[in-house]
Image: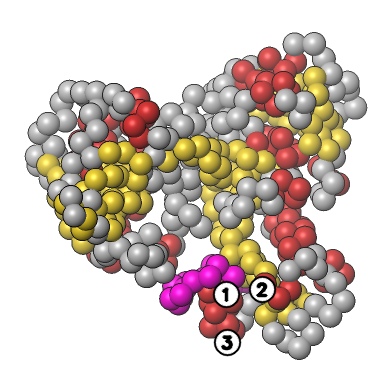
Amino acid sequence: MTDLLPEGYRMSPLTAERVGEVLEAENSTYALADPFPSYLPPLDRSWMVEASDGSLAALHASYPVRLPVPGGEVPSTALSWVSVNPGHRRRGLLHAMVTTHLERTAELGEPVTVLQATEESIYGRFGYGRAADQLQATVPRKARLRYVPDGDDLDVTFTTAGPDDADLVDALHRAAGRGRPGWLTRDSAALRSWVLLDCPWYSPRPEPTRLVVVRTPDGDPRGYALLRRTPAWLPEGPRFSVAVQEAVALDLDAYHRLWSFLLDLDLTATVQTPALAVDDPLLVWLTDRRAAVPQLSDNLWVRLVDVGAALAARRYAAPVDVVLDVRDRLLPANTGRWWVRSAGPGADTKATRTDGSADLALDVRELGAVYLGGPRLAALVAAGLVTELSPGAAARADAAFGWPTAPLCTWEF
């Protein structure tokens, strides 16, 4: 794999002795004034690129995850910590790292890899498709919500988050996201603690992480939010801003109660929502959504490493019988015609190679984009990114590849 690197560079596994150097490199790459939290993915999944003098030139790492997909889940790799030292940019190090990451993922037998992009324009050329969007909004305090009955008896507590809260947050997060594609869980003690960490590199520096929990009258937890407030004392009075990191609940009553509380904290003027799915109920409840100024951005990028295994791992919203002519420049084993067959949502899927006539032609990037049921395949056809070869095939495949629940990953990895 090192033949992908330019002369003078070599790739090797990260060792414990060099973790401090890696953290300093992250500070340099992302212009952080304070030390980056000393947590890394597993060392056996962390790789560094060294320059000829032995110094750290670049880094990438990954987490093993179970990716929720429509109707099931698939073993996957979450690519993270991708960085190139500013002094070694524009030399092909990123291309070498991502390509070797794809090859390693294939060797590990993980059919899919996912990432969250620091810059949206980077990863499409490596076959990653924008598979999930997110909405964020800055909501004025006391914004009115449409009424949802039966939640008025729920209790709300407001405390400072700490290590002892990790299990509660994790249990609610897992249960609340069950059935939503892309909803990655935090499957290690380190990751469960990570979400509760204070963030000293934010500027201006906010308060410690606060935890809001919604409970039934008998104490059963039904939802939570993590937030930080930034003080602002102005001549006209306090105008604090609230940044909500996560807000999840097990049912609509608890979710409505949670947001009713978050939108009416004392001293505050605005509330920044976390990443929300495009079908999140909050966006429907707001009686004046224009005042919230929602902003759409990318959330999760998906790359199919084993097309056949990946397509067979998910379920389809309607019966499907389609032949896809797939192009994959970096992983030639994916290139060719794939026959996808399923009787509908509850049925198993077969995805096998075929010599039959293709119905649709597309790059693996577009296949990754529609894999979680978010972006519509018909829209990609209309945009000229997918070619319909058989009349009516796009509409039939679009109905099958879509999914009733919009995909989302709630946390950054």
Relative to 192, residue 278 above or below: above
Measure the C-alpha gap from mark 3 to mark 1: 19 Å
**Left-right relation of 381 to 389:** left
Q: Which residues are magenta?
A: 28-44
Badge 2 marks a residue whose secondary structure is: loop
* Front tag of 3 and 2: 2
Give yes or no for contact between labels 3 and 2 (Cβ–Cβ under 8 Å).
no
* Front tag of 3 and 1: 1
Query: Which amino acid type is marked by label 1?
Result: Ser
Q: Is residue 265 on the magenta stretch?
A: no
Q: Which residue is mark 1?
A: 28
Q: x and y percent of residue 205 in the render?
A: 33, 66
**Left-right relation of 319 to 322:** left
Q: Which residue is mark 3?
A: 17
Q: Is residue 33 on the magenta stretch?
A: yes
* Residue, far front: 235
Q: Residues within 10 Å of mark 1 (few under 14, many from 20)?
A: some
Q: Which residue is mark 2?
A: 85
Q: x and y percent of residue 357 in the render?
A: 88, 21
Q: x and y percent of residue 363 in the render?
A: 79, 36
